[in-house]
Image (cartoon, coloured by chain):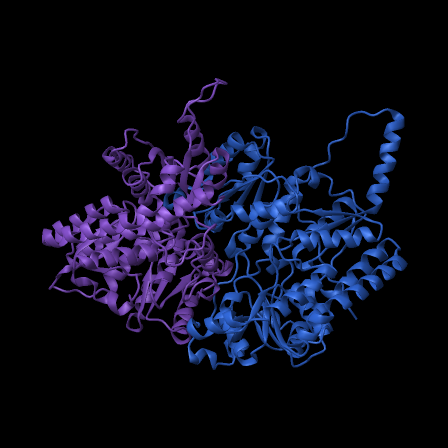
Chain colours: A blue, B purple
Amino acid sequence: MPVKLNENLKYNYLAADEPPVRDERVGGCIAYCDSCAGLQSDFKCGCAQVQNRRFSQSGGCQLGLAVGIINSLTRAVTIVHSPLGCCSGLAGNAGVRKTSRASRGLPVEEQTFIHTNMDELDVVNGGVEKLKRAILYAEEEYHPEVISIVNGCVPGIIGDDIDAVVRELEPQVSARLVPIHCEGFKSRFVSSGYDAANHGILKYLIRDPKEYPQLTEEAQIKYDFAKKYRTSRTVNIFNVGSNSNGDEVELSRLVSALGLIPRVVPLNATVDDLDHLGEAALNVSICATHDDYLLGHLKERYGTEYLLDVLPIGINCTNTWIRKIAAHFHLEAEAERLIEQENQELNEAIAPFVEELKGKKIFVGGGETRILTTADFYKRIGMELVGIKAHNLDRFVENLLNDIDDPGLTVEVAAGQPAEELNTLNRLRPDIYIGHVGANGWVTKLGIPNIPLFGASINYMGYSGAFELARRAARALKNTNFSKNIGKHVGHPLTDTWMNLDPNDNIVQGDRF
Amino acid sequence: MSDFIERSKFSCALGGALSTIAAIPKAVPIVHASGGCAAALSGTYNLSAGYRGVGYCGGNMIPTSNISQSNIVFGGEDKLVGQIESTIKYLKGDIYIVVTGCQTEMIGDDSVGIADRYRDQNVIGVNTPGFLGNTLRGYDAILSALVKEIVEKKDEKDSRTINLLGIVPGHDVFYRGNIAYLTELLGKIGVRANTFFGDGESVEKIKGYGDASLSIVLSETAGQITAKTFEKVHGIPYVTTELPIGPKASERFLRLVAEKLNIEKDIVDKVIEEETKYFYSYLERIVDVASDLDFQRYVVTFTDSYYAYPLVDFVSEELGWIPHFVSINDLQDKTKQETYTKKFENISSRTKPQVIYEDKVGLAKKKLRASWPYNNNQKYYDSLGPLFIIGSVVERDLANDYGAGFLTVAFPVSNRAVLNKGYAGFRGALTLVEDLLSNLVAAR
């Protein structure tokens, strides 16, 4: 019996300055290395959730993920309240943001960001004065619509009250100020960063939409009816930072095909788009791990129903995604017609790739919802799934996990931790690996061909995304010389002692977090 | 007190430390901090330094103690001990360097003390919290620690060996190439350079750096602390000069080294003559196109002090371009700024550049705009053009706005892939000319 993903979860946190971290609100497993059947039962009884590891490597930081959301907004300036290191990667990233906006046909803007550059003196005296100057500078120089303040570990530990700064300066600036509490040390789950950014969006950015100028009575009636109808047919599709424009176009196409009006939010949105978020009949997440906090709170605020539980990746999951949306609008027959036609076309199109990939061994690593759906796709087209690795594992994928009918499948849970992954891959030796940014380089050094799970220019979702998944994997296997050469001549720094160790021996129960 | 920075072109001290460690052959960092610091900071230099990669043991391979809430309250020293012990077992390294993040320094964990317990297993510890300063501070922290802990004391100095400092890996996107060119050049006058990061270096070799008789620092803002450490601990004096680019600067560089090491003038003269000849035998190739298409440019630079003067000196003194405006982002001290600005008086171009010190990109752009009279709709207007901007990828849109030629040299450089390229010395300067002119002919 499938579990309701958000059962007992509360969405009433907006009175607080910051959201609870995922550790408290959702919980989950960060370290596991064994069989699928083992994880299924250990997760159910709660044992998987209290595991940790001895030898550990660098994972992620929730600040990075929060910035990914908040910094995508149109005409926004991000102030990183911290020493220079946090988000220093933004320096060389201007082109990436630009390309991403250009690919969506959005106005390309040269965006700036500011570091409060906290030093030893600020650690003693507090960095609030500098932060105030930075906010006023951003307002004066750029007149942005949004100024966000992302809080790093240093002000988090010394207790800089950025919420008070926002309250104090709000009357002096025209931009909407939004404090984001995303201090890295506060959570073992980087996904806390999503909640941190969404908390800021919900609490500080979404305002009641501006009403249009006074209309005549007749015009007003017409306008109200039109708006009511539009709202009753509108589906908000919630995008994520790893979406490409191709994904958004494909998902919008499928929603339109049902006769509904798709709207892609909130990344890259203007504050005006955010103000109108409530004008929709259904909010659809494409990744529960990413969005439950946002969609749950929007339901509290506007009463908008929402769908959390399917990621439209691969054929099977995209079918389910369409069915669930259609069911909300009683469009079941339309959905079946659409699915039948799409599936037939797609199956014909990927046939040559399926021929190439059949029986090849594959390993999938990355974010929990993506990898389970991606693995499902490759398995269904006849590839041999030898293992999966999730960054973490929580209630949002419990159904997907229980659906896996392969008790002996190797399953790892680890954010980053390439040592554990390389150890496992070295035993399994898949023909191809598909994984998250940061992992693929090491896999190449192990000599295993690979492709990235997602990317700014890669279409990954919907039916066209399934086509690309098959096409890219088949392409990668056409010439595997690069990984062969690198595996032979470069290699990795892990010792034989490690490579011969059972990675499960590195996992401990109940270490203090 | 430092101020806020707009579009910072630096990472923090921990970022600089990790970038430096990644450049030392078979060195393994152990980061005592929250989980995300190491991979994110390593990622900065992977992606914004001409795609130099994460290196031997970088990115998410970096062992990290993953400090979280409870450690902030109860301390994280136990976690560090566990990481050191497992890292030694599981990662191959010639040296293991414990570096620290903001969180563990603020709660007072004694990371260096813990690292010292494992000194016999090639572990050293260095305090590198982000709030200590920028990238350059991290570079000096790591090298100073190596000089103190690893480099063996030698009473006998080799009169033909020097330490080359100030070339910061990653922050100088071309560090490998620059080191290679300078090592080769110094070799020609019989001088061996200790470089920490160059081809053929190793931890074993670094241990022997104590026999150098001089340290040469190529930066005002990086390497100074390390040079002082060499002086204090190993009695090696130091001299500060600039990164030499092109024949004239390289000649000055060689003569300085020769003077300090008492190398015979004949040897140096011969090398300078041969290398200058070599330089011009290749530069000759672009003479026709440069003259026929009128390639003289006004030049504006946006860099740190390490690249500012060397680049302006080269384009002005060798190519005859007109230096107009120099924006420098890393010198805060007023006296140092004045001394640095004075250098530009040596430039023989009739127009001397305006030199500003600004780390807020928006203000630097405004100052550039104010450096030239506006067109008040007059018919005949002496515009700032043709213009070439040398900077970092941050100035790409600016160059576009001015319709200027554009080359990224200073960090961050994310629009070019850099492998063994460098701009230093006689021969590196040829590569710089290639890159400058390629930009001007790219559309042909």
Q: Position of residue A237 (x, y in %)?
A: 73, 51
Residue B163 horizontal side relative to residue A292, left or right? left
Question: Viewer-proximal residue, A376 or A448?
Answer: A448
Q: Quadrant of the N terminus of chain B?
A: top left
Q: How many marks?
A: 0
Residue B148 visible in the snapshot: yes
Question: Viewer-proximal residue, B433 or B257?
Answer: B433
Q: Residue at x 71, y 64 (%)?
A: A466
Question: Viewer-proximal residue, B146 or A94?
Answer: A94
The relative height of residue B325 versus residue B423 in the rendered view (above or below) is above
Q: Position of residue B329 (x, y in %)?
A: 37, 40
Q: Residue at x 58, y 53 (%)?
A: A193
Q: Position of residue A333 (x, y in %)?
A: 90, 59
Residue B303 visible in the snapshot: no
Question: Viewer-proximal residue, B200 or B120?
Answer: B200
Q: Quadrant of residue A191?
A: bottom right
Q: Position of residue B443 (x, y in %)?
A: 50, 43
Residue A493 horizontal side relative to residue A429, left or right? left
Q: Quadrant of residue B292?
A: top left
The relative height of residue B370 versus residue A380 in the rendered view (above or below) is above
